[in-house]
Structures are given as C-alpha cells and as structure tokens.
Image (spheres, rainbow, N blue to C red):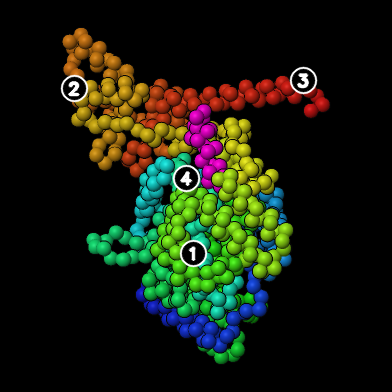
C-alpha cells in the first residue's frame, strides 16, 4: 500500500476522490486517539536545516541537483528553488547533551556540503533571506525540476492567477510584481520540532503560540530583500504574500491566508486544527492514494495518513501540527517554523533551546495560558516582533506590557532554564545556549541588526550591490568561525573579495529612484529637475510607465541658448525636443553588455525596460562607480603583490 507522486488536482473527480481519503484519515486519527495508540514514553526533538547555495561572487547558485548527486547522502534533500538545499537531522531524546549533540550533527552536515560544493566553486550561507538574491533569480527556470514543486506552483497559479504583487513597508518600501510563485524560495529557515503526547498537545500548542512573538524577537535574521531594508524578519511578510491564494473581493468577507498564525486558541485536540484546515482551505494537491486506513487499523497496523499529510503540507502554520510514524508507532509533534536560518549554528541551537525550554517550563507558571493572554494579542505580538525584533513592545499576560528586552531577560529566560532542567538537559548545555540569548538581547545585536548596520555603513562609500555582496561574504566568514552574531564586527570593504562586475546584471547596478516627465510637460520643468536633483538625464514616460523618450541636459542647454538669442520658447513641450525611441536594455542583461552599448553608441544614458515599462536607468555615474571600485581593488592587489615579493618568507 502506498502513494504515487503528489500532483495537481486537475479535475473535479480527482479532487473529490482525494477529499474522500482526507476525511477517512481524519476518522482514522480520531480512532487512534480514542484507542490510545500514540507514543508517550519518550520525548524527542528534531530539526531541519535549510541553506542557500552561492557562487564565488556570493550570488545564488542554482546547482542543487548536481550538488545532491555529488553528496550522495539521503539526509540532504531539495527545496523549491535550485539554489536552496535542506538537511534533515536525526531525532534526539530530549535529555542530557541533546542540544550540543544537535549542534554537532548540523556542523557535521554543513562541513560535508561545504567540502562538496567546492568542486562547483561555490559556498553555503545560513540566512533567512539571502541579501544578494535578485529578481532574475526567481525565474521559473530556477524551480527545482521535480513533479511536486511543479504541481505546487501550478496549484497556486490556478487559485490565484499568474501575477504576484509584493508590497512590504519597512525602513524602505518594496513594491514589485512577479510572474511566478518562486518568491517563497527567498526564504530559508531552521525548523525545530518536539514530540508531544496527545494529552498535552492542546496546552503545549497554545504555549507555542503564546511565546512565538517574544522568541522570534531575539532571533530575527532577515532584514534585506532586493536591497531594501524591510522587516526585522522579512520572511514573515514575504511568506504570507508569496503563497497567498486569496483574491480581493468587493465586500468585507473574512478570508484566511494559507500562511497563518491561526485564528483562535486550541480547545480540545489536534483534530481541531486538521478539521479547520480542511474546512477553510481548498485542496491544492492530490495523490493516487491506495492506503485503506480502516483496513490497516483493523489489522492492528498503523497508517501513514498520506492524504492528511499532503493537505497539511499546503497549509503553512507558523506552529505546525505534525503526525508521524517511527518504528511502527505513531506520534504527534509541534513544528516551529518561525526561526530563520543562521546567523550561525550556535545561534540556531540557542534559539531552539529558548523555545524548547519555554514549552517545557511555562506550564508550571501558566497552567492555562489562554486564561491570561488574549489570542489576538499573541498574534499581534508575533507580527510586531517580525517587524521590529528587539525593539518590540509586547502586550503580555494579565494585560501587562513589556519591552522585548525586559520580557526576555526578566520573565522568559528563567522559565526556559527551569524547563530545560525539568527535561534533564545537561547543565552545561543550558548555560551555554541560554547565555547566548541573554547576551544577544542585552547587546541588542540580532542577525538583522548586524546586517542593517553593516549595510548602512557600507553604502556610504560603495554601491548598494557591492554592499550586499560585502555583507554576504562577511556572513560566510563569520559562520565558518562559529562565534554567535552578537560578537560579530561590522562587515567591511575588505569583505568584497571576489567581487567582479563581469558577473553583475544591469538590475544590480541601475538607478531605480527615477525622476521622469511626460511628453506634454514644458521644457522649463525639465530644466528645473536638472538643477534641483543634480541629474543629467530625464526619461519621458506615459501614464502606464511606458518609456516614450529621453531628455538630456545638453538638449536643455541648447534650447535655453536659443531662447537667450530669441530663437526659441521655454513653453516648448518635451515631445518637441526629446529623443524618441531611445536605445534601451533589459534588467537581466549583463553590466558589460550595457557598457559595450554605451561605448559603441557613444551615449551617456541607457534606459532599462522590462515588459515595455521603464524600471531604471544606467548612466555614466553607474559606469564610474564600477570603474573606480575596480581601480581601487587593482591598486590594493598590486600593493599586496609588491609586499609579498619583498617578503619571500611569506
């Protein structure tokens, strides 16, 4: 008995057949709970580590299939995009040195993948969102070529349509349109889960919901996307929007997104969640299931509940309920999906320790968290922490209000310590990992804070793209050293080693903060734009942002020279003097192609157009930014070579 490959539910008959099996699985789980078949004696913890694959220039490297073949290790598996990978860790009994053992196991796996990826001239990065990811990296060509991923994308497109508008407001604002659901692939996480008995599931799950915000506040590591400084944990906003299948309606009808924190406290059993997900969310995927669960139970065997697991995998709860079978015995787990990957493995285990300790220790302080904390406050705490990290102010139990620092330091860390002690976790592990949370919180340097502060410092001297490269390279170096992020120094210009413009795309260097005019505007307006904004080129576009022309400062000088000699009028329209149909380039072209065009055509500005719309411009200033950086680097390399030749022992 088994199941064929997960696929798109292509017609009504397939959907109806799948739903029948889904309902059978629910009844089977009810029967298993009533018969007390679930494991209770041993509590285990586990994790999945997601990571980014990058090339020698710190850009996404879509080589997961080739890398997996070279690794030849069943513990590694694919993710949605070809530039991501996941390693699954062996479950450990929640006791003794389980935390340091988990860290050791992850480091072993990462060492293996680092050694293997060298043959592809690449490396790996642990980060919630890779700073150097580009819009062009999210092309459907980078979808992992496996049926389940194609089916998932097809299902999202079927429910939502082929265009995705992404809008996130942080320190900067990101407003961008995409034509694939591959946006989700920007996210990489560190997923931690703990086995829970059926009797304790409701209480533990509600506690997991309550602590989500405070725990995330100290763990944020995803502030940068496409060069924009957004939320402290941008993964949350990005994930919510990337797989949101809802459409805007005309009335105030309630509609829950497939990425969800939930809608209320759990009351009776894990079945409430599964039943709500079947009731709220349409079936996206199906399978040719042959598992007859009633017959399996009648034989005294345990079913896999494949239909339920397939559907559960298409609803993305930040605290996800999980069903599994190990050695013929079923068990229940709570899977924490809020943690980003990184900044280091040590940081990740510290985050996991904090969460696990609270889950195991808070019930002594709060027998029923739902009596003292409103669900809507717990949910708002989560989103506030996603946006602000350690700057969050939380509404906590009994309507008390705390800063993130005070709540974590004074209230939660002591409870987490008690919870780990109660589980019999080694005292050295407890001190080692919870001290990291305390020191990180007191220093106020999360991974997100480090990234943004490094980026702000670097962009004073170099371009946005160069700063993102330096930040990413610095992350790679620090991760290999292994010291937790609150001890990191800021990224420096020296971290741009291996930076080469030959690998750059136009979209990475183009100017996107544009000042434009329309063809009916008067040239006096253009003249003022040149003076006010100290620019030399102004694109001309229509109401739909289609490029229709280009005005240069030289053209305006010429016109005003004619006016001075009574040969012209400042009331002329832009259309009368603009360059019509200027030469353009696509954002995904290489920067060297742009330079060749500008040199060959002897032009100082190259508008960047995609789908017939203006998205940016490349000017001599962008050109000079690249050139000056290369000259400085060449000078630095020459000095280094001279020093080495003068010091033969080196």
Q: Nearer the viewer, residue 272 or 289?
A: 272
The residue that label 4 is drawn on is 225
Query: Distance between the Cα atoms at labels 4 and 1?
Result: 28 Å
Label 2, secondary structure: give it.
loop
Disc with the residue nearer the chain's start (2 vs 1): 1
In the displayed structure, 329 sits above or below 613; it is: below
- Mark found first going from the N terminus, 3 or 1: 1
- Residue 414 is situated, as x and y percent measured from the top left of the image, at 61, 60
Q: Give the range drawn in magenta.
A: 445-464
In the image shown, does 206 or 362 lie closer to the viewer? Answer: 362
On screen, residue 222 versus residue 474, left or right, reads left
Q: Which label sits on residue 572?
A: 2
Q: What's the residue at 28%, 65% (across, down)?
A: 253
The crowding category of the residue bearing disc 1, from other C-alpha atoms within 10 Å (few below 14, some 14 to 19, many at least 20), is many
Mark 4 or mark 2: which comes first in sequence?
4
Q: Name the residue under label 1.
A: 210
- Residue positioned 49% across, 65% down in the render: 209
Q: Mark 3 points at which residue?
A: 646
* Mark 4 and mark 1 residues within 8 Å of each other at the beta carbon: no
Q: Position of residue 72 (x, y in %)?
A: 68, 59
Closer-to-camera residue (191/206): 206
Q: What element carries label 1?
A: helix
- Please report the residue visible at 53 percent of the width from the left and 72 percent of the height from the top: 367
Mark 1 and mark 3 in contact (Cβ < 8 Å)? Answer: no
């Amino acid at each position: 008995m088994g199941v064929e490959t997960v696929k798109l539910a292509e017609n009504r008959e397939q959907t109806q057949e799948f739903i029948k099996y889904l309902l059978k699985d629910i009844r089977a789980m009810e029967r298993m709970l009533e018969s007390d078949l679930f494991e209770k004696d041993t509590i285990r913890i586990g994790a999945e580590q997601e990571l980014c694959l990058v090339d020698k220039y710190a850009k996404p490297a879509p080589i997961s299939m080739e890398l997996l073949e070279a690794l030849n290790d069943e513990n590694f598996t694919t993710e949605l995009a070809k530039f991501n990978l996941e390693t699954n860790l062996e479950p450990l009994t929640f006791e003794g040195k389980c935390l340091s053992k988990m860290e050791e196991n992850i480091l072993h796996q990462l060492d293996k993948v680092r050694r293997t990826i060298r043959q592809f001239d690449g490396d790996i990065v642990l980060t919630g969102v890779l700073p150097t990811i580009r819009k062009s990296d999210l092309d459907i060509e980078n979808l992992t070529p496996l049926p389940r991923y194609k089916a998932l994308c097809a299902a999202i497109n079927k429910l939502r349509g082929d265009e995705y508008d992404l809008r996130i407001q942080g320190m900067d604002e990101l407003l961008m349109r995409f034509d694939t659901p591959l946006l989700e692939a920007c996210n990489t996480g560190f997923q931690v889960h703990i086995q829970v008995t059926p009797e304790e599931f409701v209480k533990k799950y509600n506690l997991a919901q309550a602590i989500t915000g405070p725990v995330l506040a100290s763990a944020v590591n995803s502030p940068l996307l496409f060069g924009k400084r957004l939320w402290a944990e941008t993964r949350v906003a990005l994930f919510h929007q990337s797989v949101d299948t809802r459409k805007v309606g005309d009335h105030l009808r309630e509609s829950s997104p497939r990425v969800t924190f939930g809608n209320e406290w759990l009351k009776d059993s894990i079945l409430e969640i599964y039943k709500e997900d079947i009731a709220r969310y349409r079936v996206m995927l199906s399978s040719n299931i042959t598992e007859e669960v009633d017959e399996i139970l009648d034989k005294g065997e345990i079913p896999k509940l494949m239909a339920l697991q397939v559907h559960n995998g298409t609803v993305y709860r930040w605290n996800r309920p999980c069903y599994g079978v190990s050695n013929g015995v079923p068990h229940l787990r709570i899977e924490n999906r809020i943690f980003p990957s990184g900044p280091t493995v040590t940081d990740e285990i510290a985050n996991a320790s904090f969460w696990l300790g609270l889950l195991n220790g808070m019930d002594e302080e709060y027998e029923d968290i739902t009596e003292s904390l409103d669900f809507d406050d717990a949910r708002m705490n989560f989103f506030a922490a996603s946006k602000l990290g350690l700057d969050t102010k939380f509404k906590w139990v009994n309507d008390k209000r705390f800063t993130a620092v005070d709540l974590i330091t004074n209230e939660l860390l002591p409870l987490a310590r008690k919870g780990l002690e109660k589980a019999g976790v080694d005292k050295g592990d407890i001190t080692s990992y919870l001290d990291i949370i305390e020191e990180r919180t007191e220093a106020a340097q999360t991974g997100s804070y480090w990234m943004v502060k490094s980026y702000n410092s670097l962009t004073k001297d170099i371009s946005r793209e160069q700063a993102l490269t330096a930040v990413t390279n610095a992350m790679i170096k620090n991760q290999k050293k292994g010291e937790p992020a609150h001890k990191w120094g800021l990224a420096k210009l020296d971290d741009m080693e291996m930076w080469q413009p030959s690998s750059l795309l136009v979209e990475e260097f183009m100017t996107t903060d544009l000042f434009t005019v329309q063809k009916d505007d008067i040239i006096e307006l253009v003249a003022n734009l040149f003076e006010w904004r100290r620019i030399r080129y102004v694109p001309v576009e229509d109401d739909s942002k289609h490029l229709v022309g280009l005005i240069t400062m030289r053209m305006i000088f010429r016109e005003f020279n004619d006016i001075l000699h009574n040969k012209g009028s400042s009331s002329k329209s832009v259309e009368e003097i603009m360059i019509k149909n200027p030469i353009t380039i696509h954002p995904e072209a290489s920067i060297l192609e742009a330079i060749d065009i500008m040199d060959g055509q002897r032009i100082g500005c190259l508008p960047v157009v995609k789908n017939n719309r203006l998205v940016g411009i490349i000017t001599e200033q962008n050109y000079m930014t690249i050139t000056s950086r290369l000259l400085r680097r060449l000078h630095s390399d020459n000095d280094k070579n001279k020093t080495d030749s003068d010091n033969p022992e080196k």
